[in-house]
Image (tube, helix red, strand yellow):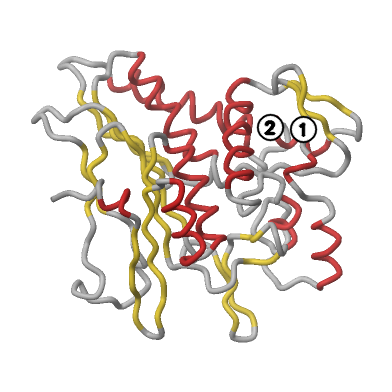
Amino acid sequence: MGTRWSVRLAARAGTDLHALHAHIQQPLDQVVAQMSTWLPGSDISRYRAAAAGTWMRLPSDFQRVLDCALEVASASGGAFDPTVGPLVDLWGFGSSGNGRHVPEAGDIDRERTRSGWQRLQRRADGRELLQPGGLQLDLSAIAKGYGADLVAERLRARGIDAALVEVGGEIRGYGRKPDGEAWRVLVESALDEDASTEEMPPRVLVLDDAAVATSGDRWHRFEQEGQRYAHTIDPRTGCPVVDAAASVTVVAADAMHADAWATALTVLGADAGRALASARGLAARFVVRDGDAVRETMTDAFKNHLAQ
């Protein structure tokens, strides 16, 4: 996934940590083997390369992630789209090796015709996926979250009663620490902004069997002719999100949904995103630029997760 992972956990004395490390790495390797667009032999790469009319049987983890991706795509009106791969590559943010640049309008229109989550067709209760021709899945905005969830599931099954799992910034916490307290994490903010603590106070979340993910424009972006282009592509326009929030943080029951919704709300923008989040009862926080300053807004559900 091109990132790091870390796990904090409560284990019995004498636990073999080397074996536990391997037990954590294995499911993450499994996610990469299925969903990495950077590996030619991954399941998602094989789907990309499949001939038109080919039905591909999906591994169970791949199916779970795609189920969630399509759920969020539908609920967000297409702001989240797992078929956005061609556009991500076109702008130079994907695995194609293209340099980051502003493409021609005609190229954007062409790649948009190769995208669209509604084109995805499945059968056998979702276990088989049709390649209609030229469709490129990209699960980068959801797979890291699922990786954190999968590690948490494996640790629970191994008898680890409490853990805080982080994969590339997506976090899943469950159980209680040895002192009986729930896990607490500091919310990511716009670290490239010079905001005072009065303007942007630190926010600490309590993760009592919950997950948190953050999306925004400070992680991957480029500038051309004075214009900033964020790595988050709006599938509805084929272009990077305009005036993207510095960060959007979502708390959910699992990191997979938190990861996907953080991206969807980033695409929708602070106003429409907050309105949808409030309507759906999502716990979301938006940090947006306001001239030279930054400001935050959050839903009531998000406030309920803040440490008192």
Residue at the location (59% across, 77% down)? Answer: 223
The vertical placement of 229 against 75, above or below, is below
Residue 2 placement (x, y as % from top left): 53, 46
| Residue situated furthest left in the rendering | 179
Q: Secondary structure at mark 2?
A: loop
Identified by mark 1, the residue type is: Arg
Residue at the location (77% across, 22% down)? Answer: 123
Q: Which residue is mark 1?
A: 46
Q: Mark 1 to mark 2: distance in Å?
A: 6 Å
Count of numbered badges drawn on the protein: 2
| Residue situated furthest right in the rendering | 52
Residue at the location (20% across, 25% down)? Answer: 10
Residue 212 placement (x, y as % from top left): 37, 44
The vertical placement of 290 against 8, above or below, is below
Q: Nearer the viewer, residue 192 or 99?
A: 192
Q: Is residue 213 left or right of residue 238?
A: left
Question: Is there CB contact under 8 Å for labels 1 and 2?
Answer: yes
Identified by mark 2, the residue type is: Ser
Q: Which image quadrant is residue 119 in?
A: top right
Residue 17 placement (x, y as % from top left): 28, 22
Q: Which residue is mark 2?
A: 42
Residue 88 placement (x, y as % from top left): 69, 56
Q: Nearer the viewer, residue 117 or 86?
A: 117
